[in-house]
Amino acid sequence: MDDFVTNLLNLPNTNVLSYQIKNEIVYIHIESTETKLPCRKCGRETKSKGVAQEVTLRHLPILGHPCYLIIKPKRGICEYCDDAPTTNQRLDWYKYKSRYTNAYEDHILLSLINSTVSDVALKESLGPDAVNGILQRRVDGQVNWKQFKKIGLLGIDEISLRKGHQDFMTLITSRVDGKTRILAVIKGREKDKIKLFLSSIPNRFKRTVAGICSDMYEGYVNAAKEVFKEKVPVIVDRFHVAKLYRKCLVGLRKSEFARLRAELTKEDYKLLKPAIALLRKNKEYVTKAERKILESLFQYSPALKVAYKLCCQLTGIYNSHIGKRKAHKKIAGWIEKVEASDLQCFNTFIKTLKKFQTEIVAYFKGRNTSGFVEGFNNKVKVVKRRCYGIYNENSLFRRLFLDCTGYDTFLMPQGLQTI
Ligand SMILES: [Zn+2]
């Protein structure tokens, strides 16, 4: 039976001495058969000097029961050092002075992926401070270049932590083979701060940057250009562009609906309301019945019809398989069409489009898909909603690191490895 428990524990060089279950909690007394016990001062082998005080370590649950390992670490005395220091044996499946085994810490970190500290604390009947402590100790608050091979596409995005507040954070990511990893969380979005981080990237990694995907924000684009010179293209991907022109459409929709609300009967206005969601929908997914609703809206609002059509056309340009030169032409043609119309809602967008023309057209070479940008942005949104109240850049970095890379890092059989 002890063999069974020993096998189940699967810790290197460990024997189970005894075990008991008290109040649904499993306590397993163990000893280590590891004989090596080097002096903590000089590193030479020590002479055995009994055992140190008992250590209780939380371990992985057994059949749903919380489980604790109890061990008396071996103690050795040094015969070489002058003051004959004693050393407690350190084993590689738990950290010295920790109250948890490495496997248990991995288990906590895995549970934290896409979850919250308070949730995990509740489920494990640990204090939130304990869960936070594990998170802080085990996951770096900043990039650890040792975990990277290359950067690939470097993304620069901004998020605002609270709606309506000016507290921006800049997220810098690496995108390789469809996987997004967080490189930095920076408070604010000033060019100098972004430049400082970009300059701090070790040269051997700078050389692996294939392109820089950025928001249409001059601070970002200029920081990237100044650090990477002409060597790396700065790209504004379709996601960022689409966000802006969709916003123009929403702006017009809001004012038009306000007008219609005043002009139409309650019943007629009510019939148009489903169109609000339909305007956001991709044209290909609009059904025949939905098309009818849109058509009736467009009868009341010709301006919305034109604006909607223009948005679809721009999406169409992005969806067609064309290169940089053709894209440049088509976008210029689109701008002309907008300018020829009576619409005012695209005015600032057109200005931006002209300002970042090079970067926008750069997207059409290589077409670095916006798929994972959007995926990542959704992750950020979820983190924001979930861990509402994270205003610290290191904490946000940790949570994003865990959500993006946690499964790759901690999902290992009996995770004894450290990151
Ligand atoms: Zn020594």
Image (spheres, rainbow, N blue to C red):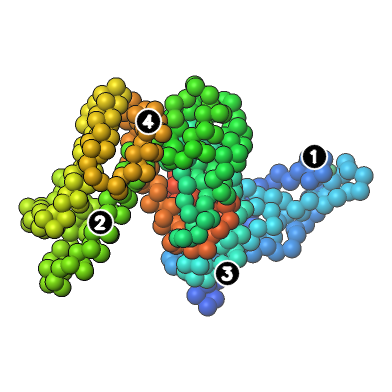
Label 4: which secondary element: helix
Distance from the alpha carbon under mark 1 to that under mark 3 = 39 Å
Q: Nearer the viewer, residue 377 or 167?
A: 167
- Identify the residue position indicated by label 4 in the image: 357
Mark yes or no: residue 123 visible.
yes
Q: Residue at x 88, y 41 (%)?
A: 80
Is the CB–ligand 1 distance for label 4 below 8 Å?
Answer: no
To which residue does mark 3 refer?
127
* Mark pair 4, 3: CA separation: 52 Å
Q: Who comes first in sequence, dot 2 or dot 3?
A: 3
**Is there CB contact under 8 Å for labels 1 and 3?**
no
Q: Nearer the viewer, residue 40 or 180?
A: 180
The residue to which callout 2 is attached is 253
The CB of the residue at mark 3 lies under 8 Å from ligand 1:
no
Q: Earlier in the sequence, mark 2 or mark 4?
A: 2
Of circles 1 and 3, the one toward us is: 3
Q: Is mark 1 within 8 Å of ligand 1?
A: yes
Q: What's under tag 3, amino acid-wise?
A: Gly
Q: Amino acid at mark 4?
A: Gln
